[in-house]
Image (spheres, helix red, strand yellow):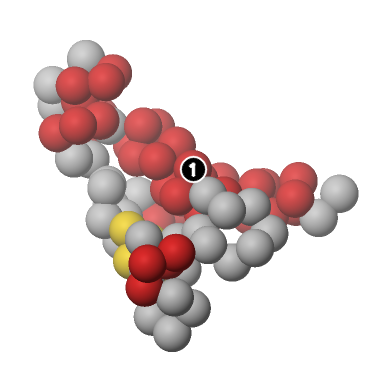
Amino acid sequence: LKSVLGESFPLLLGTSRKGFIGKITGETVAAERDYGSVASCIAAICVGDNNGLGCNILRVHNVKGTKQAVMVMDAIRKL
């Protein structure tokens, strides 16, 4: 999307516990989709890898788990 919108606009992702994660994982209980939600967030941030095309803002239910995953991902990218 950023390739279409340009850098002028931040990109928000809101995939937390959504049905498509349940379809992929087979998890029918929304509250049990946190691992898939975190994976979708990390993927969205990493899209475009280092050229600024990834997601800027995440809307999540599991703030602590997502924050930890993002911190680890950032540390890995800095290696």
Q: Which amino acid type corresponds to the residue marked 1 in the rendered image?
A: Ala
Between residues 9 and 39, which one lies in front from this camera angle?
A: 9
Between residues 74 and 11, which one lies in front from this camera angle?
A: 11
Q: Is residue 38 visible?
A: no
Q: Is residue 49 above or below residue 51?
A: above
Which residue lies at the image location 53% right of the left edge and 49% below the top edge? 47
Residue underneath mark 1: 43
Quadrant where the N terminus sits is bottom left
Q: Position of residue 48 (x, y in %)?
A: 57, 53
Q: Residue furthest front?
A: 4
Q: Is residue 76 above or below residue 13?
A: above
Label 1 sits on a secondary structure element that is helix
Q: Is residue 5 above or below residue 53?
A: below
Asked where in the image residue 24 lies, by quadrant, the reply is top left
Q: Position of residue 25 (x, y in %)?
A: 28, 18
Which residue lies at the image location 39% right of the left edge and 32% below the top edge? 35
Q: Is residue 12 visible?
A: yes
**In this picture, residue 59 sits left or right of residue 48:** left
For the residue carrying disc 1, how many other residues have a C-alpha within 10 Å: few (<14), some (14-19), or many (20+)?
A: some
Q: Position of residue 78 (x, y in %)?
A: 81, 55
Which residue lies at the image location 36% right of the left edge and 73% below the top edge? 5
Which residue lies at the image location 21% right of the left edge and 15% below the top edge? 26
Q: Position of residue 55 (x, y in %)?
A: 45, 61
Q: Residue furthest right?
A: 79
Q: Residue furthest top?
A: 26
